[in-house]
Image (cartoon, rainbow, N blue to C red):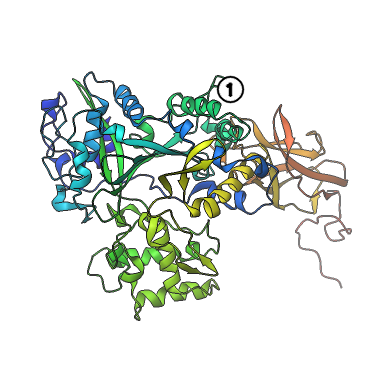
């Protein structure tokens, strides 16, 4: 199972010593210093959050009933008191299932990755986990520095160190759910160190699998409704109970319905192939501010299982030196060539929806939010001088009619990096009248408090309150307001005249504009509306292919053969989507009249309105 699920992660970070822990030792091949590869790279901008279906529409009435501070960003201390860090690590350790593997050991192992090998050798910590000095201090071939100040969190062998952390925010990132409903977005818990010296943050970012994937994004509606309904609950104590049950049990206590697997589960933080989340850290016990990313990994042998955190690349964070036109890195030319394909998406002139994709081979293992002129300073790396890279970016901008400059495109890419979003891009001009909003000083979810409607709450950044939360509010409202089943007519190819009794082919293209995926298994099909029976054309239903899935925003072209009536005349032709035995839905195809012409015609004296056989007629004398 390990090889099937996480061969790349195992190859990167297994060291020797597994057998001593009751697990089979890795082969020599598995210990080679190969950087881990992420199957589904994470981005802060993805899914329905940047999809036109949820952004290019009039705001619905749902927007007015969504309270962003109850449904999207929950920072009330009364609620967060139900989320001690110990509870998260306890649940992960219990799920792992091996007697004697404690939550404290798991917490210490996370932070011992920031120490040089061999790290803590006191024994109960397993020895086959990664350290910052592995692979000559590199991850993915890029620098990965040791952070001994944060590594000191691994020293304490009691739960006391964990108690210095407090939950400061719960975040609903339903906007990251993909349009096809492959998952239902991310659900985060942010922990901040509030005593013991230095600032330090752990962010658990769980990706929830879709509990009903055959429905597409519609399968996520119960989860979206759970969060929306929190806006109606005036009791902070009640909301605390509901959120605790959702995160730790996957249950809605209002209905006692199981919505999903528990949010807090090691599979949701990395131990799954695709559609999984991560754990990220925002570190400043020692400078500079540095952001790292981890995946949970569970490996099992004959004597039990080991759960650990594995350092991975920080997604959408290409190594900054790749932006340097003069870079000697062998990957620079490949990255710059790829970057040109992303110019159009970065040029989208919306502060919430411009974006770009970064193949993981270009991502760094860390993101520096503070130091000037370092590789993570993309703008400085790109420079101000003439270069082929600059010229090529300008050519792409010119081709799409954009007035942005290459420097502004690179500045937008920097704003998408962790370090850029958290500090480096604060107040940065991005062109097109856009300015990137400000964090709350290297963080968006702060450990500092303020008065709120329900008592003390933790402060969040101006970027969240003024820019990002209103957008997420719109996206969630648009989803909730979208019909479950809906369809739009796109085009059709239909003859105006056919021969009586003869077969002919037509095609009709429809677009899924609802949240329910169209599949044959759920009885979605195209049905005749004029007429509604099959006596006219011989067919009244056109089925989807057995393995076809048409998600929201996708189109389906139905191409099928009909048989004309034997009686000449004018016949109506109109179709619509339906889910058999459930409902007709969506737009109609245009009502069209097809002329059915007689077969009994003189081929050399063909009357008007008839289809004439293709024969050679005698020439007039």
Q: Is residue 418 above or below residue 546?
A: below
Q: At x 51% / y 33%, what residue is drawn?
A: 213
- Label 1 crowd bin: few (<14), some (14–19), many (20+), radius 10 Å: few
Q: Which residue is mark 1?
A: 254
Does residue 220 appear left or right of residue 155 in this picture? Answer: right
Locate the N terminus and report the quarter of the image it occupies.
Answer: top left
Does residue 226 appear left or right of residue 143 in this picture? Answer: right
Considering depth in this image, is 607 or 70 the residue closer to the camera?
A: 70
| Percent position of residue 428, x then y | 44, 66
| Percent position of residue 5, x then y | 30, 35
Q: Is residue 482 visible?
A: no
Considering depth in this image, is 177 or 514 the residue closer to the camera?
A: 177
Does residue 361 appear left or right of residue 586 in this picture? Answer: left
Locate the C terminus and report the quarter of the image it occupies.
Answer: bottom right
Label 1: state its secondary structure. loop
Query: How many tags in the picture?
Result: 1
User: Residue 614 is drawn in which quadrant?
Assistant: bottom right
Does residue 12 appear left or right of residue 444 in this picture? Answer: left
Q: Is residue 518 visible?
A: yes
| Percent position of residue 90, x then y | 32, 25
| Percent position of residue 205, x then y | 40, 39
User: Residue 612 is drawn in which quadrant?
Assistant: bottom right
Q: At x 37% / y 36%, what residue is drawn?
A: 166
Q: Is residue 183 above or below residue 494?
A: above
């Amino acid at each position: 199972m390990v090889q099937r699920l996480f061969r790349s992660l195992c190859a990167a970070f297994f060291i020797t010593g597994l057998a001593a822990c009751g697990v089979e030792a890795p082969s020599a091949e598995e210990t080679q210093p190969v950087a881990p590869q992420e199957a589904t790279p994470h981005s802060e901008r993805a899914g329905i959050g940047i999809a036109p279906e949820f952004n290019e529409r009039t705001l619905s009435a749902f927007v007015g009933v969504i309270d962003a501070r109850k449904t999207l960003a929950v920072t009330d201390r009364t609620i967060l008191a139900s989320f001690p860090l110990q509870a998260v690590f306890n649940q992960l350790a219990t799920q792992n299932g091996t007697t004697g593997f404690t939550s404290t050991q798991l917490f210490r192992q996370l932070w011992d990755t920031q120490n040089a090998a061999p790290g803590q050798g006191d024994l109960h910590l397993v020895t086959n986990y990664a350290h910052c000095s592995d692979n000559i201090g590199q991850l993915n071939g890029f620098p990965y520095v040791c952070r001994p100040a944060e590594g000191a969190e691994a020293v304490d062998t009691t739960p006391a160190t964990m108690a210095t952390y407090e939950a400061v925010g719960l975040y609903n990132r339903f906007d990251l759910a993909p349009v096809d409903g492959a998952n239902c977005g991310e659900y985060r818990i942010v922990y901040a160190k509030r005593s013991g010296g230095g600032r330090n943050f752990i962010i658990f970012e769980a990706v929830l699998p879709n509990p009903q994937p055959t429905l597409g994004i519609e399968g996520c509606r119960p989860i979206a409704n759970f969060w929306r309904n929190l806006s109606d609950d005036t009791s902070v104590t009640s909301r605390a109970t509901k959120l605790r049950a959702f995160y730790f049990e996957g249950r809605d206590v209002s209905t006692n319905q199981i919505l999903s697997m528990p949010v807090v589960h090691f599979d949701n933080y990395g131990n799954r192939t695709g559609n999984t989340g991560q754990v990220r850290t925002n570190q400043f016990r020692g400078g500079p501010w540095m952001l790292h990313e981890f995946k949970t990994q569970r490996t099992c042998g004959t004597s039990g299982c080991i759960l650990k955190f594995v350092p991975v690349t920080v997604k959408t964070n290409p190594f900054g030196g790749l932006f340097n036109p003069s870079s000697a890195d062998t990957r620079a030319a490949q990255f710059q060539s790829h970057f040109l394909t992303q110019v159009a998406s970065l040029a989208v002139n919306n502060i919430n929806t411009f974006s770009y994709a970064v193949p993981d081979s270009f991502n760094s293992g860390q993101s520096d939010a503070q130091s000037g002129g370092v590789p993570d300073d993309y703008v400085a790396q790109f420079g101000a001088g003439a270069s082929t890279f600059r010229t090529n970016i300008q050519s792409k901008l010119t081709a799409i009619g954009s007035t942005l400059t290459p420097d502004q495109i690179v500045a937008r890419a920097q704003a998408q990096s962790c370090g850029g979003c958290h500090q480096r891009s604060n107040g940065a001009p991005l062109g097109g009248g856009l300015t990137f909003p400000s964090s709350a000083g290297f963080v968006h979810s702060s450990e500092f408090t303020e008065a709120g409607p329900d008592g003390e709450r933790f402060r969040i950044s101006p970027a969240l309150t003024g820019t990002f939360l209103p957008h997420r509010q719109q996206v969630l409202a648009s989803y909730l307001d979208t019909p479950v089943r809906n369809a739009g007519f796109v085009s059709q190819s239909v003859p105006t005249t056919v021969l009586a009794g003869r077969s002919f082919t037509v095609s009709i293209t429809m677009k899924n504009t609802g949240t329910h995926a169209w599949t044959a298994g759920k009885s979605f099909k195209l049905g005749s509306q004029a007429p509604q029976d099959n006596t006219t054309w011989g067919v009244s239903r056109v089925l989807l292919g057995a393995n076809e899935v048409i998600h929201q925003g996708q189109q389906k072209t139905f191409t099928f053969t009909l048989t004309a009536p034997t009686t000449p005349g004018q016949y109506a032709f109109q179709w619509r989507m339906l889910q058999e035995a459930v409902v007709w839905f969506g737009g109609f195809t245009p009502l069209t009249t097809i002329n059915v012409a007689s077969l009994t015609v003189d081929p050399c004296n063909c009357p008007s309105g008839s289809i004439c056989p293709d024969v050679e007629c005698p020439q007039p004398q």
